[in-house]
Every structure is written in C-alpha cells, then in structure tokens.
Image (cartoon, rainbow, N blue to C red):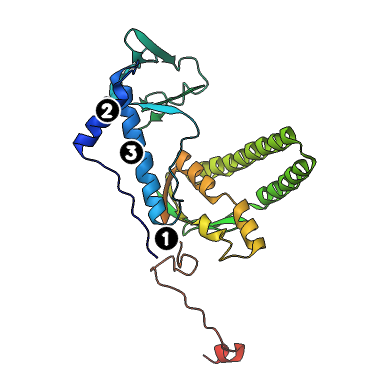
Amino acid sequence: MKIRIPIIPKDRAFKKRLREELMKGNPYASHWVDAVIRTAYSIMESWRKRYLRGRARKVKPRIRRRFARCKTTLMKIDYQAKTIRITLKQGEYLSISWKSTWFEHRVRGWAVGEAIIFDDRVVIPFKNSEEIYVRRVIGWDSNELSLDGYEPSIGFIHVDLKPLQSMKITYERKKTIAQRKGRRELYEKYVRREKNREKDFINKPSAGLRRLLPNTIHVFEDLDKEDMVSRKKRAKKRRKRSYRTPWKRIHKRMSEVTLTASVDPRNTSRESQDVGTLWRPKRGRSLNALDAD
C-alpha cells in the first residue's frame, strides 16, 4: 500500500518566517509565541508517527482545548513564599500561590515544573528528585477481568476488575436508554458519573499496591487496544469486553504514584520467571502419551 509521507519543515528560515508572522499584532510577551511554535511541532510530530503506523487518519490534528505552556526559566518562583509569577505581557502578570492548599505538605521540597495555562485553570506540576532504592521488580499480566502479578518473594497477586466491568455494563445500559428517549442532559450526567467512578476505582488499587509494594518497579504490557477493538480482527462481544477494560488508564495512574515500565506483550504469558525461556505446550498429544514420558 502506497501512502504519502507528511513532511514537517524544520529549517531555520521557515521557523523564522513563522515566528515573524505570529508576532504581528501579538499583544503578549514574545516567549508565548515561541511556546506555541514548540507545542505545535510536538503535536505534529506525534500525529505524524501515529499516521505512519496506521493509528491516525489523514486529517489535520486539532486542539480541543486551548492551552499554553510556560518554561520554568520564564517563571519567577519564590519557594519561601510559595508563589509563582508568570509574565503575560509588559506590565501584566499572573500570580499563583500554593500556600495553605490541600497538597502543600505533599510537595514540600519539590521543584516546580512547566506551567500549563488553560482558559479556566492553571496546572502547575511538581517534580521530586528523591532517590529511590528499588527492592523488587514485579510483572503484571493485563487481562479483561483481572491484573495478575508475580514476584518471587511474595508469589502471585490478583487484582479483581470484575466490579469495574459490571459498573461499565450498567452505565452502558443507562446511556442507551437515555439516548433512545432523546434526553441529552441525562446521557451526559451518566457519562460524568461513569468517568468519576472509573477514576475512583482505579485510584484505590493503585494506592493499595503502592502501600503493599513500596520501592517496586511495576512492569506492564504495552497493549495495543486499537488492534483489540478492530472490527476486522475481533468479534463484537470480544471487542466490547476489551473496550471496557481501561488498561492504559490503569498503567498511567500507576506511573503517577510509583515506578513503572512497559514491555512487549508477545509471549509474556509463556515466559519463564527465572531464566526467560518459553514454555511450549505439547498440543495434539493424548494424556496417556504425556504420562508415558
């Protein structure tokens, strides 16, 4: 199959012309234009990679929510007063304080990261440079109804995902009824509730595993969910079950609270924990033949 490979211009002359064009009539500081160009290139590069892998359509990527990133070098951070000042334009600043907030004690001694400004809020990430001594590494098998892990000193660990599947099936029925009745507000209400309950469900096992297994690297399978829900490759019932299990969100939440890594999912269910060899099942042989061996 022949496809046209999109080319993103990166030469200095093009970037200079682009910057000059965006600077015309720009009331804000010049560093915001540089941030916009940097973010746009990042989005286009991500779209290009997904398009070449067949995971994105040949459609210009669009941003659903407006946002702007600000480098830490362009922010005045006062760790004593716990305030941040960001220059919007000459003589106009944006001041943010995390003093007396609910997370103040959690980020004590942490460094402020790159700020992200939305229309209705400002997101300030914090970075922790604390060294962690890794005690163990545990591998997780991501299944439709469970997360199954194994660590030699502990054994097998089972995280049941059946309540999550049941909750999503319930809300699927409620949303279907709301759609049939044409009640859009009720449908959106169920969407928000389902999202919040899914988030709450994921947060609980993530926090529990962090307390149960401190200083541990959790290794997850890098699953391709788009392939699992493909109409050409999977049956309808199998696609629905795969769609309900949010593996990516579980893995992402775990990466926010502890150390994680990802591996290729091929042969992970048949690989030996000790020497890395593969277990090859003997197929097509009778039980008597196996006993004779």
Task: State the residue position of label 2.
Answer: 19
Task: State the residue position of label 3.
Answer: 41
Residue 264 is marked as: 1
As helix, strand or loop, the secondary structure at mark 1 comes to loop
Label 2 Cα neighbours within 10 Å, binned few <14 / some 14-19 / many ≥20: some
Q: State whether residue 137 is above or below residue 288.
A: above
- Residue 10 in the figure: left or right of residue 35: left
Please tell me in which quadrant of the rendered image residue 55 appears.
bottom left
> Marks 3 and 2, Cα distance to the nearest angstrom?
13 Å
Q: State whether residue 200 is above or below residue 20.
A: below
Q: Earlier in the sequence, mark 1 or mark 3?
A: 3
Query: In front here: 41 or 164?
Result: 41
> Marks 1 and 2, Cα distance to the nearest angstrom?
41 Å
Residue 160 in view in this figure = no
Q: Earlier in the sequence, mark 3 or mark 2?
A: 2
Q: Which residue shows up at 44% across the image and 50% down it?
A: 58
The image shows residue 65 at horizontal and vertical percentages of 49, 31
- Residue 131 in the figure: left or right of residue 225: left
The image shows residue 287 at horizontal and vertical percentages of 61, 87
The image shows residue 188 at horizontal and vertical percentages of 68, 35
